Image (cartoon, rainbow, N blue to C red):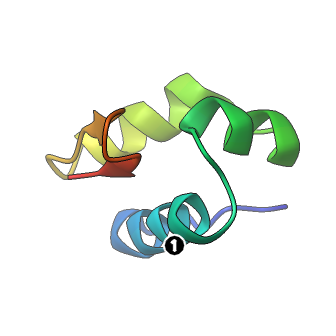
């Protein structure tokens, strides 16, 4: 899957997938063959960080 380049759209897509389909960011990345650190880095640029307990970027 090609994730969006726009950071706000990426945030929405990732959080929706985490909420609806995946128990963790690791599981999402493994299933979609995406780089976890890349996602974290991109979303950190817009001041969002992954909250493992809530399984979402905040």
Residue closer to the observer: 46 or 17: 17
> Is 58 on the left-hand or right-hand side of 55?
left
Q: Position of residue 50 (x, y in %)?
A: 32, 38
Q: Position of residue 51 (x, y in %)?
A: 28, 37
Q: Secondary structure at mark 1?
A: helix
As drawn, 23 above or below 18: above
Is residue 6 left or right of 53 when viewed as pictured? right
**x, y percentage for residue 39?**
51, 40
Q: Answer left or right for 36 relative to 12.
A: right
Vertical arrangement, residue 23 with respect to residue 19, above or below: above
Instruction: Write down the residue under mark 1.
Output: 16
Pick the quarter of the image with the N terminus. bottom right
Extreme residue in the top direction: 37
- Nearer to the camera, 37 or 15: 15
Please state which of residues 28 and 46 is positioned toward the viewer in this rendering.
Answer: 28
Vertical relation: 41 (above or below) 55: above
Q: Residue at horizontal 21%, vertical 47%?
A: 48
Residue 18 occupies quadrant: bottom right
Placement of 33 over or under 37, stated as above or below: below
Q: Residue at x 70, y 45 (%)?
A: 28
Q: Quadrant of residue 11?
A: bottom left
Residue located 83% across and 48% down the image = 32
């Amino acid at each position: 899957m090609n994730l969006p380049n726009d950071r706000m759209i990426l945030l929405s897509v990732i959080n929706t997938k985490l909420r609806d389909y995946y128990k963790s960011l690791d599981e999402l990345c493994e299933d979609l063959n995406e780089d976890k650190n890349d996602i974290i880095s991109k979303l950190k640029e817009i001041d969002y960080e992954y909250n493992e307990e809530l399984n979402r970027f905040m």
